[in-house]
């Protein structure tokens, strides 16, 4: 399965991303920019979400109403994805939320799972995974494998920044039909950080430890 990549090209998204990239942006400002950018990214990612129609009575006449046909499951990848959860849930109040905790080993860059709180059966569910950073792709593939093991096939990944390596890893996994991001950056450095990137999205939101 090929992954359909959607790079959101909008001045408002670019301005929020610029604030996040700027090393002088403090933690509170960073979290605010991530929240606002997530709203824009999820809005774009859900443009083709399945909808159904029903009649609605206005005070004047009957009109055509619209609602989501299959409210999604949102899955923020902890820690950094936590900063996207509230904004996504505000746009999709009908959604449920699951949680996956992954920490990347600083030496090997391999993800280590420390939390998995997901519904047992995801067959037929639309899942939207939230993680600001797609670097090597190891973490998002590990997350999507957890989802696929529960039967999920309809998976959207929403991230702030992607490296070409990460996009390729997602593509090779065959697990993710759609990726929405604000930018595909140049590449990775020797520490597997996205370049130019924005640093460590978890540390910038919550502190380094
Ligand atoms: C970062 C980031 C992604 C992952 C990306 O998380 O938030 O989850 O690394 O790297 P990858 O594509 O090479 O796997 P990290 O493991 O630093 O944990 P944190 O969110 O707790 O800071």
Image (cartoon, helix red, strand yellow):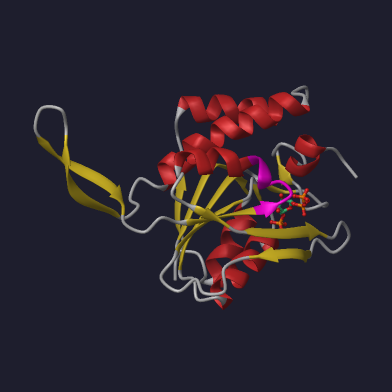
Q: Is residue 195 left or right of residue 130?
A: right
| Residue 142 appears anywhere in the view | yes
Quadrant including the N terminus: bottom left
Q: Is residue 168 above or below residue 120?
A: above
Q: Nearer the viewer, residue 130 or 73?
A: 73
Which of the 4 image quarters holds residue 144? bottom right
Which of the 4 image quarters holds residue 137? bottom right
In the displayed image of the protein, which residue is found farthest to the left? 61
| Residue at image point 84% right, 60% down | 105
Image coords of residue 79 (percent x, y) = 74, 49
| Residue at image point 79% right, 58% down | 103
| Residue at image point 58% right, 77% down | 149
| Residue at image point 63% right, 50% down | 131
Image coords of residue 142 (percent x, y) = 66, 67
| Residue 22 appears anywhere in the view | no
145 part of magenta stretch: no
Q: Nearer the viewer, residue 169 or 47?
A: 47
- The residue stretch that appears in magenta: 77-83
């Amino acid at each position: 399965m090929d992954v359909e990549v959607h790079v959101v090209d909008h001045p408002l998204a670019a301005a929020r991303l610029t604030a996040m990239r700027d090393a002088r942006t403090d933690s509170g400002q960073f979290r605010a920019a991530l929240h606002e950018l997530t709203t824009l990214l999820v809005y774009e990612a859900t443009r083709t979400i399945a909808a159904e129609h029903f009649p609605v009575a206005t005070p004047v006449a009957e009109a055509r109403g619209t609602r989501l046909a299959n409210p999604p499951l949102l899955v923020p990848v902890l820690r950094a994805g936590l900063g996207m959860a509230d904004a996504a849930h505000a746009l999709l109040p009908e959604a449920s939320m699951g949680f996956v905790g992954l920490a990347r080993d600083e030496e090997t860059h391999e993800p280590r799972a420390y939390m998995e709180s997901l519904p047992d059966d995801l067959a037929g569910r639309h899942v939207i995974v939230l993680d600001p950073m797609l670097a090597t792709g190891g973490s998002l593939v590990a997350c999507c494998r957890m989802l696929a093991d529960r039967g999920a096939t309809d998976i959207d990944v929403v991230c702030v920044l992607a490296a070409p390596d990460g996009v390729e890893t997602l593509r090779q996994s065959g697990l993710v039909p759609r990726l929405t991001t604000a930018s595909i950056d140049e590449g990775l450095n020797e520490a597997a950080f996205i370049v130019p990137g924005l640093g460590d999205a978890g540390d910038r939101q919550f502190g380094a430890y």
